[in-house]
Image (spheres, helix red, strand yellow):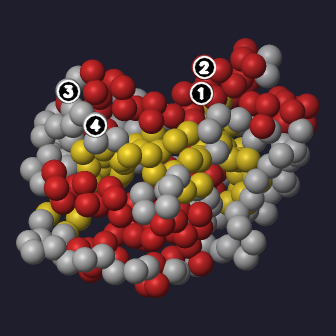
Amino acid sequence: MRRGLPDGTTRRSLLLGAATLPLLPRPAAAEELVVFSSGGLNAAYRVLVPEFQRASGHQLTSIGASSMGAAPDAIPQRLARGEPADVLLLAEGGIAPLEARGFIRPGSRVDIARSLIGACVREGAPKPDIASLDAFRRTLLEARSIAYSASASGVYIETEMFRRLGIHDQVMPKARRILSERVAAVVARGEAEIGFQQVSEIVTVPGIAYLGTIPEEVQQPTVFCAVVTAQARQPEAAAELIRFLASPAAADALRRTGLEPLSRS
């Protein structure tokens, strides 16, 4: 079954609600943190940054970066170049390779939200049927061009989903992996007929029509996590930010950007 956004949600409403979040206790000393944030969490995170800064006194330098992959701005590449970061917000699939290379502080992982893969077309274009597995397969075969993420969802689409649908060889010649940009932005410019990425990375992009999530039979949920880096200069402040992002106070912003919060209280 396809899932849409909560009733009444608009792109403008994604920016509302942060002002009503409860204040955090102000620490004795303010710190400066560098955060690498992958696209799946980025929309919610950007909404929450001002409130965290106002309440905690800490200042955040936020840098967008994909969870994995070989793009120059991907988190693994940035860390390998020695770029400083205190907190990483990324898909869980990107964590193990970073742990193996000693980039993550042991025991610091906190799961923030769960995301599903969604689809979009250009605003005003015909909306293809993706409600059933057969309709979804037919839509992919008939599409003139397909765009998908270079990060977690795209890796799954290219290496598993097309094969599970039995159409890998037919669709790969017209499919394109998008580096360092939202798939929806490419679709909005008319450079791809249909695009696939995490719902949270689609719904805030203007110029597209959101079709919903892909069928459950080929769906691949992704858990987005927060970790403290091994070289964090401000590990206590970093842990404070992660607690805030995983708290009930942040849940509304996560939901409004197409994510399922994983806070336990």
Marks 2, 3: nearer the viewer: 3
When asked about the image quadrant of residue 58, the answer is: bottom left
Secondary element at image label 4: loop
Q: Which is more foreground, mark 4 or mark 1?
A: 4
Per the image, the residue denoted by label 4 is: 107
Rendering coords of residue 14 (x, y %): 56, 73
Badge 1 is on which residue?
Answer: 156
Q: Nearer the viewer, mark 3 or mark 4?
A: 4
Q: Determine the CA span between mark 3 and mark 4.
A: 12 Å
Residue under pointer 3 = 102
In the image shown, does 36 or 263 lie closer to the viewer? Answer: 263
Q: CA distance from mark 1 to mark 2?
A: 5 Å
Residue at 80% x, 39% y is 215
| Image coords of residue 214 (percent x, y) | 75, 41
Secondary element under disc 2, as helix, strand or loop, is: helix
Q: Look at the image and tell me whether residue 188 can be seen.
A: yes
Seen from this angle, which residue lies furthest front?
265
Q: Amino acid at mark 4?
A: Gly
Cα gap from disc 4 to disc 1, whole angstroms: 27 Å
Q: Secondary structure at mark 3?
A: loop
